Image: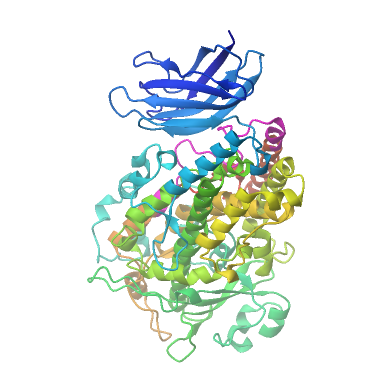
Amino acid sequence: MPSYTVTVATGTQRFAGTDDYVYLSLEGTAGCSERHLLDKPFYNDFERGAVDSYDVTVEEDLGEIQLIKIEKRKYWYQDDWYLKYVTVKTPMGDYLEFPCYRWITDEKEIVLRDGRAKLPQDDKTQILKQHRRKELETRQKTFRWKEWHPGFPLSIDAHSHSDLPRDIQFDNEKGVDFILNYSLAMENLYVNRFMHMFQSSWSDFADFEKIFVRISNTISEYVMQHWKEDFMFGYQFLNGCNPVLIRRCTEIPKKLPVTTDMVECSLERNLTLEEEVKQGNIFIVDYELLDGVDANKTDPCTIQYLAAPICLLYKNLENKIVPIAIQLGQKPGPDNPIFFPSDDTYDWLLAKIWVRSSDFHIHQTVTHLLRTHLISEVFSIAMFRQLPAVHPLFKLLVPHTRFTIAINTKAREQLICECGLFDKANATGGGGHVQMVQKAMNDLTYSSLCFPEEIKAKGMDSKEDIPYYYYRDDGIKVWEAIKSFAEDVIHIYYESDEVVCEDVELQAFIKDIYVYGMRGVKTSGFPKMIRTREKLAEYLTVIIFTTSAQHAAVNFGQYDWCSWIPNAPPTMRHPPPTEKGTVTIKQIVESLPDRGRSCWHLGAVWALSQFQDNELFLGMYPDEHFVEKPVKEAMAKFRKNLDEIVNAITERNKNKKLPYYYLSPDRIPNSVAV
């Protein structure tokens, strides 16, 4: 009688093994096997990390194996099991791989197809078409869209992390408990003694060092030493943790009535301001989005303030970007003065601090939350709803969705919810952050997520004109590597543009993102369908780059750039100055966050800057969803390209006082998971 050798691999996560009854049956083109008992309780099979083999004997040859069914029946108590994969050796000596990489919970069963990726039009038999359809029907019932706030991209329909499907939950929920992590961070940073000291001001700038963890030769220490300098202020717009706002100024806006006479002492080329603009030497950062946003009112004992400044910057003869004018409100007038480097030292310093505080708010809520976390969740939900596990694009994208829905659900549960941790220290807490996301949705366009296109649209693409913009340089290299990888995979499965058009699952995926993620807004520029391989490659690059590189660029530098509180104040306790010549050091310190808010802020930026345990970085794909040789060769080529980028960045950073490494592929996690 024909005999099949079945090998079953259990995951290495905590509690991945099971003591339950496990059954297997095979379904082929010529028939089905009976249900075979593989494991009984206390047989010590299917333990964590185990690879177990069994002989399954059948009465007649089953033909080509199309599906395998795994059933788990409870023995005593709920015992979830993480199944990595199953391999089957046929009587003819052929090996078939059936990837799973899923949890089997309760008394459930799963049906697996072999690992060869197939488009919907590739399936010819009714049994495979039915399996594909059933999987998506089940997923669409499980992964439901929900509006968290009006105007937001839709998110997952789950109130808490425990409500999520087991497959997308964190392995260890405690590891992503924001309250616990922030508290532990403050304890590890030795600042927990200050954490309840709200309304208690620091005495001077040096006093902030009481909560500053001095780590020698690090960016955070360099920031602490040089934060007052105009060079450091300007440098952060290029290579800090929010390097996405600066743009080349093509015309001085009417709402910022700056003249040559006002900034003449800052201009080094003996040109008028208008001539400097024409030569491309003037840059601008406008925080208009913050205009009209309500400041945090959750603590009646502390009035908090926001500003919507406009900052004009200049590229000097050393090719350094430095500030030359700052207006702290959007409407010019006598009570909204324009500040210059030639003003009194404390006037100019306070103006820069206000810009840094505004930059922090835009970074946290728009650059980080909306444009990486929330949009990545949209990609993730649409993928689970519309792409079955056998689809090549599911196999390509699933590593880049790891834990994204889980971290966002946890954030909505503890961090950005009403009375959440965000309210404790941030001036945009208490609802301001919600208003900001709603306003920022107008600027969340498809083209703005295409990295090279967005850089060019801001006039920041010339390496000759702006030589020290490492975020741009490294980002374009990583973008091109990802795009090349996406193109290689696409050309394996899509022979022509016509095949792209005929892929109904792909088109449903694209439509889900447009309709639910972007709320069907035409001006977003998100496509409703994709008709060419070229456009598909770009779209997949947008997804992978956003969920990996873009998030890394704006997330993991938060401790470096924001741990020195005066450089990134999460709140201000006095309103912006309305006249010049009155600012004192005492006023500045009393404007900055109190001791309690400083500590919560420090704990937050520390916790958010840490990689996950067992982090998987860009190009690391230990779960072998793909089994075909051409795709594995494409992965190897991708890793080689990424290694070359790592080497180039490492070489450039040698002996730099301010190395830029956030877009080094060995520091870019595959997905948004923190």
Based on the displayed image, in which of its 4 quarters is residue 365 positioned? bottom left
Residue 416 position by quadrant: bottom left
- In this view, the residue in front, 107 or 342, is 107
- Counting from the top left corner in percent of width and height, residue 493 is at 71, 41
The residue at 56%/14% (across/down) is 5
**Quadrant hosting residue 468:** bottom right
Q: Position of residue 358 (x, y in %)?
A: 45, 70
Magenta extent:
605-634
Q: Can I make out residue 383 in this image?
A: yes
Q: Left of 358 or right of it: where is 304?
A: left
x and y, in percent, of residue 431 in the image: 35, 68
As for residue 609 lying within the magenta part, the answer is yes
- Residue 271 visible in the picture: no
**Outermost residue to the bottom:** 334
Q: Quadrant of the N terminus?
A: top right
| 463 to the left or right of 169 | right
Q: Could you say where residue 497 lies in the image, as x and y percent from the top left?
A: 75, 52
Q: Is residue 72 above or below residue 205?
A: above
Is 574 placed above or below 81 here? below
Q: What residue is drawn where x is 36% and y is 56%?
A: 412
Kindly identify the residue that appears in the image at 43 percent across and 21 percent down.
Answer: 23
